[in-house]
Amino acid sequence: MELTLDTPLDMHLHLREGDMLRLVAPFSAAQFAGGVVMPNLVQPVDSLERVRAYRAAIAAACGAEPFVPYMTLFFRDYSREELVAAKEEIIGVKLYPAGITTQSEAGVRDFDRIGPTVALLEELDIPLLVHGETTGFVMDREEEFLAVYRWLAETFPRLRLVMEHITTAAAIEFLDRFETVAATVTLHHLLITLDDVAGSLLRPDLFCKPIAKTPRDRAALRQAVLGGHPRLLFGSDSAPHPRHKKECLGCAAGVFSAPVALPALVELFEQAGCLEHLPAFVSANARRLYRIELPAKGVRLARLPWRVPEHYARVCPFLAGKTLGWKLENDMAGPVSIERGQGRW
Ligand code: DOR
Ligand code: ZN
């Protein structure tokens, strides 16, 4: 059996730079027509000049494979002139609370000061993408942050607000109350709970921000996603780190899910008997809400067993060693990836 997905999109993606970019970008390009690229590089992508340079590096890393990198600017105080100039070249502005996750130190320290820039985003109709966590107890961070989301949604009623990588039942309830709000959901938060991360031997490959939550939260996410919620978008939050940054004291947060994204999603939706809702989750909802127009790209999968490699160069993928029931026809697991892995990673 075969299945073709029409123009799949990954609406939240970390591609990194240099050798890591060259290693990981082809996995996204093989499976997706485009993706929303996060700006949390070592030097944040916080100017049009950096957006352009990063876009060119991504295009080079994707080679001949058609893949549209939808660029984001790292949130800071921006002038109207800066945002007007950038508007046509970005899909949104990504806000990180300072220090909340990987390379977010330049993020927001004082939410009382973000109003003027958010007002400009609302006026210029530029989406605001938010990593919504407080610095409270790790399991409560997302729910506590809902107060900020509520303030944003009520104070800026025309702002297009995207709650990134939601993980809780509370966030799903919140989404249902505000029509102007959308949210991305990752593959890993649909599959794992905190028990998978820390219930037995500690699993650095599953450690990420937001941390995986409770079975009840996962059930709420699954119900909404598999039930075809019109404002939920697939965003892998694929976030590669080399093994020496994961398997050490002070493990970096991030799950590298790009190589397995579509095969694992197809398997999840098929097992739930909800395959008819997959095209909206991986494409149509995003195209409608972000008003994306791009050339059609069919991505084919076959129902064949596929054992996920233990590692690609020095990076461990999500579901390493597991056998999935679906395989990409444009398989990246072969010698190509080993060749690509000759760089620093
Ligand atoms: O686990 C995460 N890793 N969450 C994020 O928000 C950032 C990401 C990264 O860049 O490594
Ligand atoms: Zn992310």
Image (cartoon, grey):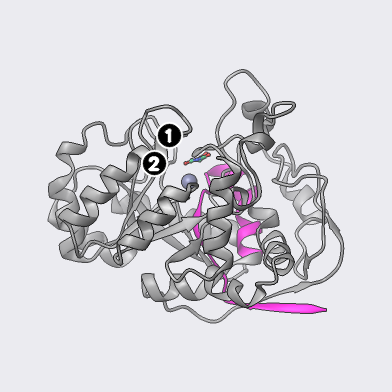
- Residue at screen point 70% across, 45% down: 317
Task: Determine if the magenta segment contains residue 27.
Answer: yes
Q: What label does residue 140 carry, if any? A: 1
- Badge 1 amino acid: Asp
Among the 4 quarters of the image, the one containing residue 131: top left
Above or below residue 261? Residue 231 is below
Residue sitting farthest toward the top: 249
The residue segment tinted magenta is: 1-30
Q: What label does residue 143 carry, if any? A: 2
Can residue 231 be seen here? The reply is yes
x then y, percent, for residue 12: 48, 55
Residue sitting farthest toward the right: 305
- Residue at screen point 70% across, 56% down: 260
Q: CA distance from mark 2 to mark 1?
A: 5 Å
x then y, percent, for residue 127: 30, 61
Task: Determine if the magenta segment contains residue 44.
Answer: no
Check the picture and name the quadrant holding the C terminus.
top right
- Residue at screen point 80% across, 51% down: 308
Among the 4 quarters of the image, the one containing residue 328: bottom right
Viewer-closest of 168 and 317 = 168
Q: Pointers 2 and 1 in contact (CB under 8 A)? A: yes
User: Of helix, strand and loop, which one carries label 2?
Assistant: helix
Above or below residue 141? Residue 131 is below
Q: How many marks?
A: 2
Check the picture and name the quadrant holding the N terminus.
bottom right
Pointer 2 residue Cβ closer than 8 Å to ligand 1: no
